[in-house]
Image: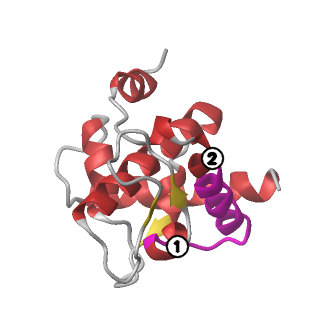
Amino acid sequence: MDVILERFHARAWTYAEGDPRAVAELERRIASTGRAGGFITYSDLARSVSFDLPNLHESPRTIDVLNWQQLDRAIIGDFLNYVSMRSYELAEFFSSALVVTKMDGTPGDGFNVLLKDLGLIRALSSEEALEIWVENVKKAQAWYKRHA
């Protein structure tokens, strides 16, 4: 098994494994964005998705995309890492590369943290991280266009 998959499989998934329906919806939204050759913001990705998570006191949870809470960021981060694992298993790209901030159209800090956790970069803000992001954007968009 490749080392990236080993590291993905060693991760503890706090939320994503608890709601396969939400995983499927996030994957559908990312795939639609990739087929169009674009990007999706975190807010557009999460908008109106109901997360039915057994380990939350108040579930299902719908993220208020105008007022993100720390828990919301943790939930989306876990789901994005999980869908990236699934896209990497399928076609060796990180689908979460297509999810960006409204501010400047780049991935949030969580994307670089994932790259660091997987041993792909040494520093969170680096030219290396930018190159990996761009490479994954190209791979994701090309793959989604071919697999419409």
Q: Quadrant of residue 72?
A: bottom left
User: Does 38 sit left or right of 115 as displayed?
Assistant: right
Give the residue number, with chain letter if any, for mark 2. Answer: 21
Q: Secondary structure at mark 2?
A: helix
The residue indicated by pointer 1 is 47
Q: Main secondary structure of the magenta part?
A: helix
State the extent of the magenta-drawn residues as a range: 24-42
User: Residue 105 occupies which quadrant of the picture?
Assistant: bottom left
Q: Which residue does the image show at 42% across and 68% down from the upper left?
A: 63
Return the disc, 1 or 2, that comes first in the chain's sequence.
2
The type of residue carrying mark 1 is: Arg
Q: Name the one closer to the observer, 83 or 57.
A: 57
- For the residues labelled 1 and 2, the Cα–Cα distance comes to 15 Å
Residue 99's place in the image compared with 120, above or below, is below
Q: The residue tagged with tag 1: helix, strand or loop?
A: loop
Side of 67 where 143 appears, left or right: right
Residue 34 placement (x, y as % from top left)? 66, 64
Residue 34 is a magenta residue: yes
Q: How is the image coloured?
A: secondary structure
Q: Is residue 64 above or below residue 138?
A: below
Amino acid under disc 2:
Arg
Q: Could you tell me which residue is drawn at 26 percent across and 61 percent down? A: 109
Expressed as whole percent of the image width and height from the top left, the position of residue 67 reads 31, 80
Residues at discs 1 and 2 in contact (Cβ within 8 Å): no
